[in-house]
Image (cartoon, rainbow, N blue to C red):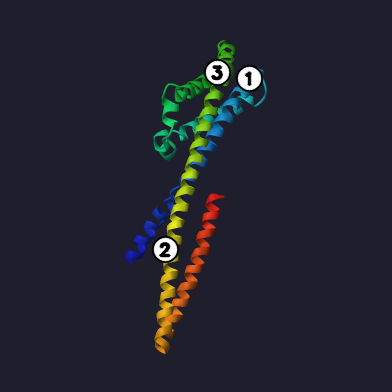
Amino acid sequence: MLHHTRALADAPKRASAAPKQTAGELFGKTINLSGRRRFTSQRVVLYAVLASQGRDGALTIARDALTTFGDAHGALLQGELSPDALGGELKQAYFGPDRANERIVGFIELARRAIEAISASAHSAPALLEELVEAATPLLATLNRLTQIYEDLARQQAASAKKQLTAVMGDIELIARHARIVSFNAQVVAARAGTSGREFAVVSGEFTQITGKLDGLVREAVRSAVA
């Protein structure tokens, strides 16, 4: 009974443990987040301009877009998606001479101030909005560069994974080839043994069929990997 109770207590922990993402999934996620960040940066500026012109609902959309932009940027700096974790040129791009992270954080703060000024009809609103519009183009260039780096890293990872898989499949194919030789030799020995070797021959024949199926799986896996 105690064991059953403990098993029930442990069940939520097991259920909540998310499976570890593959490298391909991680890079796919970074490209998605980077694209979202690029799109919402322009959306923030567009709806801030529309809000300054009195367009209904534009202020809310601008705020929501800024939140989405900030969340996407934060996600790309944390955990498995962080520049430290993914390596390559990312750390240099974010924190090196290009100062991408500084530019992005500065844009978020500028957009926040502009949106609040527009909301309050403050005297500073036109100047802040003009500054925000001017910041949009260089920021977009920065975001494009970062997205390109994520895409390049994803391609490098995919090529490396295919190369590794091909090498592993080559090893398996070599093992299967050796197994066929052993199976053939076993059948020869069984044939020479006469009646007493029949059972051994049956097992050897099954072994040959298994290695044949293994060869087929290897070829299919390699074709899929390099497609």
Classify 162 as above or below 119: below
Residue at the (63%, 18%) spot, across then down = 52
| 54 sits to left or right of 216 | right
Crowding around mark 1 (Cα neighbors within 10 Å: few <14, some 14 to 19, many 20+) is: many
Question: Which secondary structure lies at badge 3?
Answer: helix
Whether residue 25 is visible, yes or no, is no
Residue at the (46%, 32%) spot, across then down = 74
Q: Amino acid at mark 1?
A: Val
Q: Amino acid at mark 2?
A: Ile
Mark carried by residue 175: 2
Q: Are marks 2 and 3 in contact (CB under 8 Å)?
A: no
Residue at the (43%, 85%) spot, across then down = 198
Write down the residue under mark 1. Answer: 49
Mark carried by residue 135: 3
Q: Earlier in the sequence, mark 1 or mark 3?
A: 1
Q: CA distance from mark 1 to mark 3?
A: 13 Å
Q: Amino acid at mark 3?
A: Ala
Q: CA distance from mark 2 to mark 1?
A: 67 Å
Between marks 2 and 1 in the image, the one whose residue lies nearer the viewer: 2
Question: Which secondary structure lies at badge 1?
Answer: helix
